[in-house]
Image: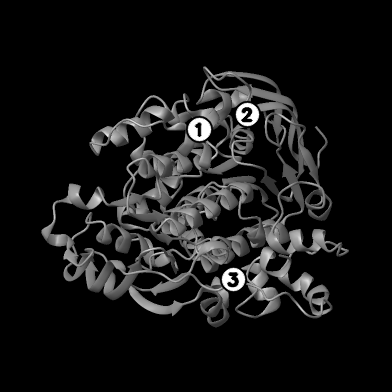
Amino acid sequence: MPADLAVHLRQATYTYPDADAPALTGADVEVRAGELALVMGPSGSGKSTLLRCLNGLVPHFYGGVFSGSVDVFGRDPVAEGPRGMSDTVGFVFQDPEAQFIVDDVEGELAFALEARGYPRSVMAERLDEVSRLLGIAHLRGRRLSTLSGGQRQRVAVAAALALRPRLLVLDEPTSQLDPMASDELLTALVELNHARGLTVVLSEHRLERVVAHAHRIVYCPQAGGTIRAGAPRDVLGEVPLAPPVSALGRRLNWRPLPLTVEEALPFAQSLGTLSNGRRPAATPGEVRLAARGLYHRYPEAEALRGVDLELRRGEIVALQGHNGAGKTTLLKTLVGLIKPDSGQVLLDGANVALMDLHQVIGRVGFVPQSPGSLLFQDTVRAELEFTRRSHRLPPADSLPLLERLGLTRYADTYPRDLSQGERQRVALAAILAAEPEILLLDEPTLGLDYLQKARLSALLQELRDEGQSVLMATHDVELVATCADRSVLLDQGRVLDAGLPGEVMARRPAFASQISRLFGDARHLTLEDVLP
């Protein structure tokens, strides 16, 4: 392998045990030392599999059949395995909980260093360094089980960096981070990449967050197609997926193709008069679910501090805010999984605290951040059938619902063999099979590519138009721009702002979509608003 190459895959092909087809077919990939490489592509296209090849998780942990070769800084992960490669490759999983060993932040950060016998003075220096770099110094005394999904994500990255690997591999590292935390993480990775020469390979679906930082894009097509790799502008000019400003630039033939809002501004200023933008807001019906003065405190922190919120029939409300703002706690309180310290949750005017939990979940469907907690049947079809039985509903054909979510071909697949995004959609299908009147979603676009997000957005709008009520906690500002009727912004357990999405985005640029930031008004939030 040439001396300047950090990663070289040659005709790498891998098939998981009992799979009908390879997850990776004939992959030829090169990443140079000191590069930041973005791996992108549709959900289920083999991105995670490609990353797992880089430290030997494939095939050592997963089994299956591997052919071809992988070279990482002159070493063979297939021969050495994850343990042998751990001093060279730091790996951060899509689901950070999958790699945690202990239950407290300090212990997790120190675990790998302790296992290798580092002196206490060195350990203290490394822990201070990574804690500062990832902005988690204030979390070091906390238990991991009390952290938000985004906070756990940052702890996992910090733990991987503690060993100072030459290659850092991250699978969807910003998927559970709010926009500001995402920017902070990427800034830290770019600093490590530039200042220390750390080679970084990461996969990501929220391309708008990453493309400006990448030296190289590796595009994995669906169904074993040929991998396309090259400079970001070259690849984004040709492949189906692109962040909003780049997609707009392709439609209007802007050259050079913009990768950021800043690069697109001169082109946008020359467009002249725009279309009228967004359609009139939906007219919602009566209040279905309400929070009245909710307070809840965990032993380590106060999560909700006097939250008032209303969800009406036939509307989609986006619940936004930084990691740890209280979004997940609020959703769990609304569905009755957490009892508030004070305040009330009202379901059609009735106090949820006085209702049986089964009564509540029969009417309010809740899809958590981690889809695995809902999936335990042998097939996707069986998950939906189990849901209907458990809610005492008559049997029904599951294929129409699976088709709406793009899951038909997985009907007889074991759910845990699917990608993160596919499992997310299966969990949503399982909840929808119960025909809930109200739907609560916690980060519903985790692991979804742009095409699948568009499908999800269309489905949510169909449900809204059918009279369902949807409340979704999300860091995905592009999803909010596409389908939300209202936005509620939480900050440290309180409602900081609320209103129409465009109005909230105008007041809170950190939570604005790319198109909103580009045109600076409340009417143009998505590509479709500009070019109907």
Mark 2 highlights which residue? Answer: 77
Is residue 337 shown left or right of residue 282?
left
- Amino acid type of the residue tagged 3 in the rendering: Arg
Would residue 105 be seen by someone viewing this image from the given angle? yes
Q: Which mark is residue 418?
A: 1
Mark 3–mark 1 Cα distance, whole angstroms, equals 36 Å
Image quadrant containing the N terminus: top right
Instruction: Single out the residue that lies furthest toward the bottom.
Output: 507
Identified at 40% across, 54% down, the residue is 441
- Amino acid type of the residue tagged 1 in the rendering: Leu
Q: Position of residue 81 (x, y in %)?
A: 56, 27
Q: How many marks?
A: 3
Mark 3 highlights which residue? Answer: 279
Front: mark 3 or 2: 3
Front: mark 1 or 2: 1
> In this orientation, which residue lies closer to the viewer: 94 or 124?
94
Q: Quadrant of residue 68?
A: top right
> In this orientation, which residue lies closer to the viewer: 291 or 394?
394
Identified at 36% across, 32% down, the residue is 396
Q: Earlier in the sequence, mark 1 or mark 2?
A: 2
Mark 3–mark 2 Cα distance, whole angstroms, equals 53 Å
Q: Secondary structure at mark 1?
A: loop
Identified at 57% across, 27% down, the residue is 58
